[in-house]
Amino acid sequence: MSYCCFNAYKIMWIFCLFDLPTNTKSQRKRASDFRKSLVEDGFSMMQYSVYYRHCGSLEACEKHVKVIKRIIPTEGKISILKFTDKQFENIETFLGRKLEKMPASPKQLELF
């Protein structure tokens, strides 16, 4: 039996950054529905319009990118960034002047 070794260069993270119009009630609803759909797909909020998600592989990453592309609203700007786990660990986040650690990679292996 052979074992596949996971490393920090194969595990991926997706960031979804968006700027959606919220001038009218229908625009606010579309923006809210978009955020809710991201959360339902396993994304976590980093900032109000920045969401991120851990993926076990590039293939899993592409699956979630397709989900985002399917739910993109008709207006606004959406950017999708993909990082390896190694790149993700180098992100520095500050809360005021205090350095805040990024969440650790999930220890559980993703199967789906």
Image (spheres, rainbow, N blue to C red):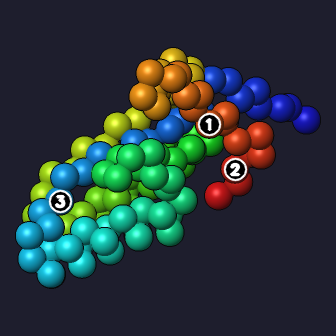
Q: Position of residue 99 (x, y in %)?
A: 52, 22
Name the one closer to the observer, 32 or 109.
Answer: 32
Residue found 76% across the figure and 27% down from its top = 5
Q: Quadrant of the C terminus?
A: bottom right
User: How far apart are the two marked residues, 1 and 2, measured between alpha carbons?
Assistant: 17 Å
Q: Is residue 56 above or below residue 89?
A: below
Secondary structure under tag 3 reads loop
Name the one closer to the observer, 78 or 94.
Answer: 94
Q: Earlier in the sequence, mark 3 or mark 1?
A: 3
Q: Earlier in the sequence, mark 1 or mark 2?
A: 1
Q: Earlier in the sequence, mark 3 or mark 2?
A: 3
Residue found 42% across the figure and 62% down from its top = 38
Name the one closer to the observer, 101 or 30.
Answer: 101
- CB under 8 Å between discs 3 and 2: no
Q: Which residue is mark 1?
A: 103
User: How far apart are the two marked residues, 3 and 2, measured between alpha carbons?
Assistant: 31 Å
Q: Is residue 95 left or right of residue 86?
A: left
Kindly identify the amino acid type of the residue bearing the numbered disc 2: Glu
Q: Is residue 91 visible?
A: no
Farthest residue to the right: give it: 1
- Circle 2 residues within 10 Å: few <14, some 14–19, many ≥20: few
Residue found 63% across the figure and 23% down from its top = 8
Q: Position of residue 89 (x, y in %)?
A: 56, 23
Name the one closer to the observer, 3 or 74.
Answer: 74
Secondary structure under tag 2 reads loop
Secondary structure under tag 1 reads loop
Q: Which residue is mark 2?
A: 110
Residue found 49% across the figure and 55% down from its top = 43
Count the numbered circles shown: 3
